[in-house]
């Protein structure tokens, strides 16, 4: 339980709602039940639950009697703040006298920063570590607290190093009881860091699990420079110390230049005088070899050492794997976003106590890849630059971020730490490293092979050396490393050739995906490559490659629309039409998509010009499919202008021609349009019949996008027939299909319709929430309602919901909806009222 307690504590603890936390000089008390699993087995679930409940009552009553404020409670552990040290000690003493189960306690006094989010500062961690060092029934008190207590029944336990690697702490025990030795560090040379360890609780847990495995004796923490391998390894070694009765020792290898000196350096660290292997022999000992990458030739000697010393465990940090038998790799990731922000904030306050984080901090940390070294170097700049100013200057991040005089020479700047790894590469590795910078957002193996002439062995080597990462089916670089690689690419003279290859490769990918009948197959492939496709589009635009630009926009327009990337679509469609006229097939497809946006924007004159150009090109090239598409759009334009009879006649003609040509997809689409025209004419029954026919046609073709569109319109027709139950079913089915497709516009349509149907079915609160969600999505997409009838239905639903709920309840439900993500909307819509 002790290790779990420490893992739960962070530097910021949220304020409780029932009491005000003390500020200024505060005394913290941590408590934790020792051996809870054993107690559960001994007493059984019911008796153990009763004991826990009694334990909580005893503690809370003692805390309250002496002015303690409960900050956090997790499981059977408490974190309490007291305004005075005597109050904390008295509460601990009284609680221990009444408790019937073994509880360890730790008390420490400090001056933490109290923010709106809670306590911030290392004193919180210090108190938790002190509690974790004790045993059930024992109360440990720090020297800082003892100085405020004038002895008061405290027994001096001497100096101890806690597992946070801080300087030795004189510890005191309340009362004269006898307990086993404290769970603190001993027989170690682990260095005392100058700053507290933050975050990484998940990684520490995973490393602890690995180091406890009997079959694993060599664990290598690998990652690029600046990911915090050394700090993580030191902390993991400290926490594992209980398992190594002969000690935990650190061997710093960065200063060495000769691989032959690795074992000698290790011997000096552990105090060997008769050779390292002889000294270690059967000792149960953990050796931390730090910064091994430039001494990789010594790896074979480690294999021999492990054979000679059966109880020895090795923990290694390196930018490159050792690649010897029995090695277990553990790639060290960047910090999780909340941890990155916390690290930056704490380090910034160390540089400037008045520093207050702004919204720019999160963006700044993200742009620095949540890389610990980059965050620390950036935080040191807050004395003269605000987070906003740092963001503006990040184009030169490699040189902007510099360390102080006492920084490791390899980490004086972010550039230096990457250069250290780059200088260790072979020539072929350097060439591929630079070429991979042409990709943005990573790439697949096939793309790397075709664009950058990569081979699998060299890619694997770059992964092993932590300059390239691999997850799923993609290779990628941290952005800070990619910036360095991009400089190397620019120096190589290969950039123009590679940019052309890159654009050609992603054009081919986009056109293959676009040719798939089912958008649900093509869109995920496109979405995974958004960054690379945007890079290809920008290159085509800037290089004057108009044909490539037109073809790429034509291939991507359908995916953009399905996924709701309307702003992006509008920008590139307009630019493509300005720039490119050939090939005609691509231009017609761009004209098709641009027409849709023109109609939605209410610019019917532009829509007319676009469809007319499409018709002319189709006639000139003899493309019957595109000609039918142009005739279909001309009919819909007539409907937009109010000529419903003319639109219906033209659509029937197009449907007949499509059937004669065997164009089932066009036939299904025109059937939807006929249903929409009938709906606008007020003939909801005819509309529903046509739309159900379209649903069947699209299902036969396996075109789920068409299915979703037709089902949404079925829902609106059912509402027109005052069949709210039927409408609900149609909208729910449409949303299920849209969710599978990731079709954000259809999710917005379905949510709007289902919201109106629920209001009609007297589920006003749920309906109002969905109406708010749909409104927020439509606002984000910058699209309005489709027609006057849809607008009237929406307005009526809003009015009915307000009347039923009242203004305040309606506003609350609407606000909940506005805050929902598309995924949350889908989850909400899957649930029905009992």
Image: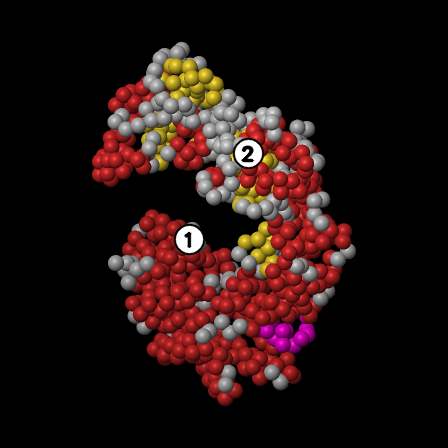
Mark 1 or 2, closer to the camera: 2
Judged from this view, the residue extending furthest toward the top is: 150
* Label ID, residue 820: 1
- Horizontally, residue 237 falls left or right of residue 440, namely left
Q: How many marks can you see?
A: 2
- Asked if the residues shown at circle 1 and circle 2 are in contact, with their CB atoms under 8 angstroms apart, the answer is no
Q: Is residue 96 magenta?
A: no
* Rendered location of residue 724, percent (x, y): 30, 67
Label 2: few (<14), some (14–19) or many (≥20) C-alpha neighbours in 10 Å: many
Determine the main secondary structure of the stretch shown in magenta: helix
Let me know if residue 556 appears in the view. Answer: yes
Q: How is the image coloured?
A: secondary structure
* Rendered location of residue 672, percent (x, y): 44, 76
Image-quadrant location for residue 294: top right
Instruction: Please give the name of the residue rendered at 39% of the width and 65% of the height, measured from the top-left corner.
Output: 736
Judged from this view, the residue extending furthest toward the bottom is: 660
Please provide the residue range marked out in magenta: 576-594
* Label ID, residue 287: 2
Is label 2 in a helix, a strand or a loop? strand
Is label 1 in a helix, a strand or a loop? loop
Q: Nearer the viewer, residue 204 or 399?
A: 204
Instruction: Please give the name of the residue rendered at 58% of the width and 71% of the height, measured from the top-left corner.
Output: 512
């Amino acid at each position: 339980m002790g290790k779990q307690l420490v893992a739960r504590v962070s530097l910021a603890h949220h304020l409780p709602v029932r009491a005000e936390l003390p500020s200024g000089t505060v005394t913290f008390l941590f408590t934790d039940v020792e051996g809870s699993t054993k107690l559960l087995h001994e007493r059984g679930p019911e008796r153990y639950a009763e004991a826990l409940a009694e334990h909580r009552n005893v503690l809370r009553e003692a805390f309250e009697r002496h002015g303690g404020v409960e900050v956090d409670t997790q499981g059977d552990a408490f974190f309490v703040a007291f305004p005075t040290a005597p109050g904390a000690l008295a509460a601990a003493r009284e609680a221990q006298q009444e408790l019937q189960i073994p509880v360890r306690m730790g008390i420490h006094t400090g001056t933490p920063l109290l923010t709106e989010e809670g306590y911030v500062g290392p004193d919180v961690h210090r108190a938790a570590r002190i509690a974790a060092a004790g045993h059930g029934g024992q109360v440990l008190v720090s020297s800082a607290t003892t100085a405020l207590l004038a002895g008061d029944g405290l027994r001096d336990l001497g100096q101890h190093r806690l597992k946070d690697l801080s300087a030795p702490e004189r510890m005191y025990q309340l009362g004269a009881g006898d307990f086993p030795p404290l769970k603190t560090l001993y027989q170690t040379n682990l260095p005392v860091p100058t700053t507290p360890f933050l975050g990484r609780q998940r990684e520490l847990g995973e490393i602890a699990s690995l180091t406890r495995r009997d079959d694993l004796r060599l664990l290598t923490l690998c990652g690029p420079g600046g990911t915090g391998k050394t700090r993580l390894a030191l902390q993991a070694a400290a926490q594992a110390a209980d398992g190594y009765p002969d000690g935990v020792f650190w061997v710093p290898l960065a200063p060495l230049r000769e691989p032959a000196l690795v074992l000698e350096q290790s011997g000096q660290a552990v105090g060997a005088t008769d050779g390292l292997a002889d000294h270690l022999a059967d000792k149960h000992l953990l050796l931390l070899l730090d910064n091994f990458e430039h001494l990789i030739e010594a790896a074979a000697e480690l294999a021999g050492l492990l054979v000679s010393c059966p109880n020895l465990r090795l923990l290694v940090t390196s930018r490159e794997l050792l690649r010897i038998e029995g090695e277990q790799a553990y790639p060290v990731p960047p910090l999780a976003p909340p941890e990155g922000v916390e690290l930056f904030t704490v380090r910034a306050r160390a540089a400037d106590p008045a520093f207050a984080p702004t919204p720019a901090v999160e963006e700044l940390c993200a742009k620095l890849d949540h890389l610990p070294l980059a965050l620390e170097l950036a935080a040191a700049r807050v004395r003269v630059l605000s987070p906003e100013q740092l963001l503006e200057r990040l184009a030169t991040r490699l040189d902007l971020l510099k360390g102080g005089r006492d920084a490791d020479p390899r980490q004086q700047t972010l550039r230096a730490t990457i250069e250290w790894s780059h200088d260790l590469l072979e020539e072929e590795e350097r060439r591929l490293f630079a070429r991979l910078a042409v990709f943005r957002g990573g790439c697949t193996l096939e793309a790397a092979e075709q664009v950058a002439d990569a081979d699998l062995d060299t890619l694997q080597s770059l992964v092993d050396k932590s300059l390239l990462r691999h997850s799923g089916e993609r290779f990628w670089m941290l952005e800070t490393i990619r910036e360095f690689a991009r400089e190397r690419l620019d120096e190589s003279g290969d950039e123009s050739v590679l940019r052309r290859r890159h654009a050609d490769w992603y054009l081919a990918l986009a056109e293959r995906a676009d040719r798939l009948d089912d958008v649900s197959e093509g869109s995920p492939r496109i979405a995974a490559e958004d960054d690379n496709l945007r890079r290809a589009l920008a290159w085509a635009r800037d290089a004057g490659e108009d044909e490539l630009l037109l073809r790429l926009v034509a291939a991507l327009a359908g995916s953009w629309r399905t996924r709701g990337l309307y702003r992006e679509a509008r920008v590139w469609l307009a630019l493509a039409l300005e720039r490119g006229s050939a090939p005609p097939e691509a231009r017609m497809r761009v004209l098709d998509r641009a027409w849709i946006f023109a109609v939605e924007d209410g610019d019917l004159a532009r829509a007319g010009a676009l469809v007319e150009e499409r018709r002319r090109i189709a006639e000139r090239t003899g493309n019957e499919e595109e000609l039918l598409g142009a005739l279909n759009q001309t009919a819909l334009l007539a409907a937009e202008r109010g000529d419903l009879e003319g639109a219906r006649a033209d659509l029937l003609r197009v449907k007949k021609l499509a059937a004669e040509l065997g164009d089932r997809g066009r036939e299904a689409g025109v059937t939807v349009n006929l249903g929409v025209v009938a709906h606008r004419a007020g003939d909801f029954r005819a509309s529903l019949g046509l739309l159900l026919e379209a649903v069947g046609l699209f299902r036969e073709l396996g075109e789920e996008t068409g299915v979703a569109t037709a089902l949404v319109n079925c829902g609106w027709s059912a509402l027109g027939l005052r069949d709210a139950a039927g409408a609900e079913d149609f909208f729910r089915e449409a949303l299920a299909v849209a969710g599978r497709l990731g079709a954000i516009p259809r999710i917005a349509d379905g949510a709007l319709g289902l919201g109106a149907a629920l209001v009609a079915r007297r589920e006003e609160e749920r309906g109002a929430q969905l109406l708010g969600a749909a409104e927020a999505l439509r606002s984000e997409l910058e699209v309005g309602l489709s027609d006057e009838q849809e607008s009237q239905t929406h307005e009526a639903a809003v009015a009915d919901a307000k009347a039923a709920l009242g203004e305040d309840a309606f506003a609350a439900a609407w606000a909940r909806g506005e805050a929902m993500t598309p995924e949350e909307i889908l989850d909400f819509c899957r649930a029905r009222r009992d």
